[in-house]
Image (tube, rainbow, N blue to C red):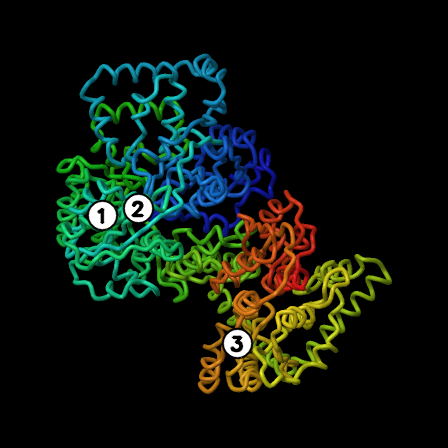
């Protein structure tokens, strides 16, 4: 059956994915199972979702909804139709001054909180994956997290839900008329829910069991507490959908009650001699008012102790030690100080290895939580290559937690999972444990199965705990739902599923599954492929950063595809291997901006861009490398030719019309795909005479060396007749009273980024060494600081050391390289000056600022020289990547769209960034002239 063709009757072909590369890349989520879908579709409205339900029923094909794909129990994969909601379902509306927020399923929790931040609010659930997890999954898994406990999770903070049942009927708990309509149109379901509620209210044993089970975190099975928490069957059904993992209905929209985002916080790492002793501190800490208490065993600390800026004591902790990350949160500084001081007075009663050291510095707090939230991928990264990462998620009554962990550790020892790691939300008795078995034989699968059976028995029968606290049942715990809940309540769950989805086509096999071995089937292998990415466990934390995420693929999926290629190679499937490799060229390689932002979100710093650069290097022929090296050796001539081409192109546009060059290059691109396209942002190159005249005339007491980047030398003309970037730099420096020298040897050199990003290794090394040698001379052997006027070039220079000779590495280490933002913030801004602040401006922080960790300086700089500064919540990589926007303009168009739509909602007095090509991309997308932050300073300084 050609399912793609059939689906075109209800969804346009452009939003139906059936190529091999699409099916392979969507076969995995963050969990440890894999299923290959028959098709991936991207509906844009409710009518298309209803049509998909009908298609599923008519063709007897399962339907599974996915948003961020960060689920961990196998609930967002399928061998049927996968419905990808990550692109067209991201609307948000802040209501009632931030006390409520209306969301669609395809917006990340982190983005929702970004919108809520100015109202000092946030959503209740706060999973570690919140920056990449989307609201559909957060709701469908009843996510909780670090601070929300059982009172502020998804279930308890939902106000209204709009949903579509498998039969296509749409209901909303916000609409009073829908309550009557539900009884009329869904009579049998209405009465089933009503009668079941009455049955539970009359059965004290079952009623008390439900009440008791939800005193701790519990996401096993359906949320049967809705049957006793709510009276009307529509409200019951709506809350059953929370945690139902997409097995009952499609959640189209939700209104959430928000919770306070406390402005004052203070946190500390507390070290204990062993994990049992740490658990004994949980109740005193909770009583002291700690809002977050996160547990980390010694093994998990080993996985992160190499990270910078962590307390040095971690490396020296004894092997049985454990740690609690504790945070207090309050509305005022006085309250937070009181809470911390009260705790410190009683801290000596705890068996601490070191005195507590609390911090309220925002950067340090953010770093602590980045480490804690990244523990799962971090510890998964240190597994043996080729092993599978399995993360379990259990909860116990807090007073029993220490004993339960000791029993769990005994099971690790019994089954020889010697590298097992424990961490989790200790305040709620919720722990995660990670094991890394190698499923390379039936015996290994049997060992894992026997281990899990003992875990289930221990959690349920000995401690009356929960087999899943917040990760959802999925396939992982489906065989054990009946074990935890008992026959009576499990029968109720089955009745609900059968009543809502009688054909069992909506995420079948998840939650309700008669196959008692489903938890050991379709386990995802993680074969050894490439050193750049072998640490990846496919968590998906990187995806929201990727500029190509809405066009082709993402860092995670690029890695999934590479692993599939390796499996095909090992299995001898060379036909599909060739097909997949051919499709990877555009999706994986050509549309990767190699910007490296994925590494900033990855807990183990995997930079998929580095993988793509290496693959590009390996794709180059010896002739291509020789040509690139020749260009590098004759860079001054190449620059001259490029400047001439720009001038000629602008002349042609003046003679034959503004679109002449765009039309010519578009025509050539049809014949030569590598042909760059002309855009209206390409102006004639700037006049270099002022730079030529001033270079080499070094003041005796010059404070800085100014290196005009090749981008500025070629594309640095000012917009609408303004002076060039280079002249503006000199003007700002003069106004600040800073003496500047321009090297006499600047021409014929560059930062080598153009060769690095394209994978020309020899040319890259040649130009990097030339640059350092020239700057060593210009800076009087490192005595004078060097300023680069383009942030992407500054980043490239700061990271070129590995390409240098030993002698030039010494020179590199002795020199100080400043990005323009560093220079303006640290050197110019503190100088005495009269300024007339500009009105409201908007910023585009380029990738390089984020990677150099100076985005804060960029914002502070603008705030000093403008009355009001906006940084869009959707700001991210523009996809330009130097020249990538000229070669693959659809990448830049896709990458800039969310930010452009946000910026266009308001008119600004200025639009600023710090890299010329990114400014060109944003100017094109927004329809306003973005320019270097230098122009803001030059305009307002007297």
The correct choice, above or below, for 685 with respect to 720 in the image is below
Disc on the earlier residue, 3 or 2:
2
Disc on the earlier residue, 3 or 1:
1
For disc 3, the neighbor class at 10 Å (few under 14, some 14 to 19, many from 20) is many
In the displayed structure image, the side of residue 193 where residue 316 appears, left or right: left
Residue 111 in view here: yes
For disc 2, the neighbor class at 10 Å (few under 14, some 14 to 19, many from 20) is many
- Rendered residue at 64%/73% (across/down): 710
Q: Under tag 1, what secondary structure?
A: helix
Distance, label 3 to label 2, CA atoms, is 50 Å
Distance, label 1 to label 2, CA atoms, is 10 Å
Q: Which residue is mark 1?
A: 343
In the displayed structure image, the side of residue 476 where residue 822 appears, left or right: right
Residue 39 in view here: no
x, y percentage for residue 191?
36, 14
The correct choice, above or below, for 761 with respect to 82 in the image is below
What is the quadrant of residue 430 in the picture? Answer: top left
Q: Are marks 1 and 2 in contact (CB under 8 Å)?
A: yes
Q: Which residue is mark 2?
A: 328
- Rendered residue at 73%/61% (across/down): 719
Q: Under tag 2, what secondary structure?
A: strand
Distance, label 3 to label 1, CA atoms, is 57 Å
What is the quadrant of residue 361 in the picture? Answer: bottom left
Disc on the earlier residue, 1 or 2:
2
Of tags 3 and 2, the one toward the viewer is 2
x, y percentage for residue 396?
20, 39
Q: Which residue is mark 3?
A: 761
x, y percentage for residue 319?
17, 62
Q: Under tag 3, what secondary structure?
A: helix
For disc 1, the neighbor class at 10 Å (few under 14, some 14 to 19, many from 20) is some
In the displayed structure image, the side of residue 740 where residue 143 appears, left or right: left
């Amino acid at each position: 059956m050609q399912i793609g063709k059939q689906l075109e009757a209800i969804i346009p072909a452009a939003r139906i994915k059936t190529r091999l590369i699409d099916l392979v890349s969507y076969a995995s989520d963050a969990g440890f199972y894999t299923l290959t879908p028959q098709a991936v579709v991207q509906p844009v409205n409710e009518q298309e979702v209803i049509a998909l339900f009908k298609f599923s029923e008519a063709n007897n094909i399962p339907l599974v909804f996915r948003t961020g794909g960060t689920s961990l129990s196998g609930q967002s994969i399928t061998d049927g139709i996968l419905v990808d909601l990550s692109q067209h379902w991201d609307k948000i509306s802040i209501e009632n001054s931030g006390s409520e927020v209306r969301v669609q399923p395809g917006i990340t929790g982190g983005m929702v909180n970004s919108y809520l931040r100015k109202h000092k609010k946030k959503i209740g659930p706060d999973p570690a994956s919140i920056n990449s997890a989307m609201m559909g999954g957060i709701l469908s898994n009843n996510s909780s997290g670090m601070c929300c406990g059982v009172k502020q999770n998804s279930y308890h903070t939902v106000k209204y839900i709009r949903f579509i049942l498998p039969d296509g009927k749409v209901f909303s708990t916000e609409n009073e008329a829908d309550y009557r309509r539900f009884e009329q149109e869904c009579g049998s379901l209405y009465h089933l829910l009503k009668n079941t509620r009455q049955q539970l209210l009359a059965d004290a044993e079952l009623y008390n069991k439900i009440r008791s089970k939800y005193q701790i975190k519990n996401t096993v099975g359906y949320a049967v507490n809705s049957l006793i928490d709510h009276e009307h069957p529509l409200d019951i059904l709506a809350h059953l959908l929370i945690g139902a993992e997409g097995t009952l209905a499609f959640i189209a929209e939700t209104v959430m009650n928000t919770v306070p985002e406390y402005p004052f916080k203070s946190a500390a790492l507390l070290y204990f001699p062993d994990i049992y002793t740490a658990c004994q501190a949980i109740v005193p800490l909770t009583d002291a008012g700690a809002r977050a208490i996160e547990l980390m065993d010694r093994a998990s600390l080993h996985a992160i102790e190499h990270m910078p800026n962590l307390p040095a004591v971690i490396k020296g902790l004894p092997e049985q030690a454990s740690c609690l990350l504790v945070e207090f949160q309050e509305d005022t500084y006085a309250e937070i100080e009181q809470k911390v001081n009260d705790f410190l007075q009683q801290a000596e009663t705890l068996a601490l290895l070191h005195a507590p050291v609390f911090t309220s510095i925002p950067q340090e707090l953010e770093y602590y939580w980045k480490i804690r939230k990244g523990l799962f991928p971090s510890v998964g990264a240190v597994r043996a290559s080729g092993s599978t990462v399995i993360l379990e998620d259990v909860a116990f009554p807090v007073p029993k937690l220490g004993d339960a962990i000791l029993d769990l550790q005994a099971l690790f020892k019994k089954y020889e999972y010697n590298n097992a790691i424990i961490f989790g939300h200790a305040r709620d008795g919720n722990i995660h444990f990670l094991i890394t078995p190698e499923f390379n034989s039936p015996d290994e699968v049997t060992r894992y199965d026997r281990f899990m059976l003992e875990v289930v028995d221990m959690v349920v029968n000995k401690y009356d705990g929960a087999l899943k606290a917040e990760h959802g049942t999925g396939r992982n715990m489906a065989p054990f739902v009946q074990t935890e809940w008992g026959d009576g309540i499990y029968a109720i769950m089955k009745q609900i599923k059968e009543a809502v989805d009688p054909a069992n086509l909506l995420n079948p096999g998840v939650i309700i599954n008669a196959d008692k071995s489903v938890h050991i089937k379709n386990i995802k292998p993680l074969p050894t492929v490439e050193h750049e990415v072998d640490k990846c466990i496919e968590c998906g934390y990187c995806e929201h950063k990727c500029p190509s995420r809405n066009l082709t693929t993402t860092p995670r999926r690029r890695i999934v595809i590479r692993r599939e290629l390796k499996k095909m190679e090992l299995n001898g499937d060379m036909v599909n291997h060739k097909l997949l490799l051919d499709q990877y060229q555009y999706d994986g390689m050509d549309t990767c901006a190699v910007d490296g932002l994925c590494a900033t979100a990855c807990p183990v710093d995997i930079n998929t861009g580095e993988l793509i650069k290496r693959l590009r290097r390996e794709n180059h022929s010896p002739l291509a490398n020789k040509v690139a090296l020749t260009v590098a050796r004759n860079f001054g001539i190449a620059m001259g030719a490029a400047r001439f081409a720009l001038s000629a192109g602008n002349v042609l546009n003046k003679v034959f019309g503004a679109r002449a060059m765009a039309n010519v290059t578009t025509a050539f691109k049809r014949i030569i795909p590598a042909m760059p396209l002309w855009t209206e942002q390409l102006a004639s190159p700037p006049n270099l005479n002022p730079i030529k005249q001033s270079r080499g005339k070094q003041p005796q007491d010059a404070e800085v060396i100014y290196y005009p980047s090749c981008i500025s030398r070629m594309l640095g003309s000012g917009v609408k007749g303004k002076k060039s970037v280079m002249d503006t730099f000199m003007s700002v420096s003069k106004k600040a009273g800073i003496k500047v020298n321009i090297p006499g040897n600047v021409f014929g050199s560059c930062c080598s980024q153009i060769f690095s990003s394209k994978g020309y290794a020899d040319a890259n090394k040649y130009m990097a060494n030339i640059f350092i040698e020239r700057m060593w001379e210009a800076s009087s052997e490192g005595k004078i600081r060097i300023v680069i006027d383009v942030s992407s070039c500054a980043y490239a220079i700061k990271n070129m050391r590995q390409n240098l000779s030993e002698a030039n590495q010494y020179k590199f280490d002795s020199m100080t390289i400043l990005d323009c933002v560093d220079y303006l913030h640290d050197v110019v801004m503190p100088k005495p000056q009269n300024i007339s602040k500009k009105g409201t401006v908007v910023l585009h922080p380029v990738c390089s600022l984020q990677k150099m960790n100076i985005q804060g300086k960029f914002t502070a700089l603008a705030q000093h020289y403008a009355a009001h500064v906006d940084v869009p919540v959707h700001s991210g990589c523009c996809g330009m990547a130097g020249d990538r926007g000229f070669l693959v303009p659809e990448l830049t168009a896709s990458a800039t769209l969310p930010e452009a739509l946000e910026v266009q909602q308001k008119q600004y007095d200025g639009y600023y960034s710090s890299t010329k090509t990114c400014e060109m991309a944003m100017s094109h997308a927004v329809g306003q002239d973005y320019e270097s932050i230098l122009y803001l300073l030059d305009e307002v300084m007297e």
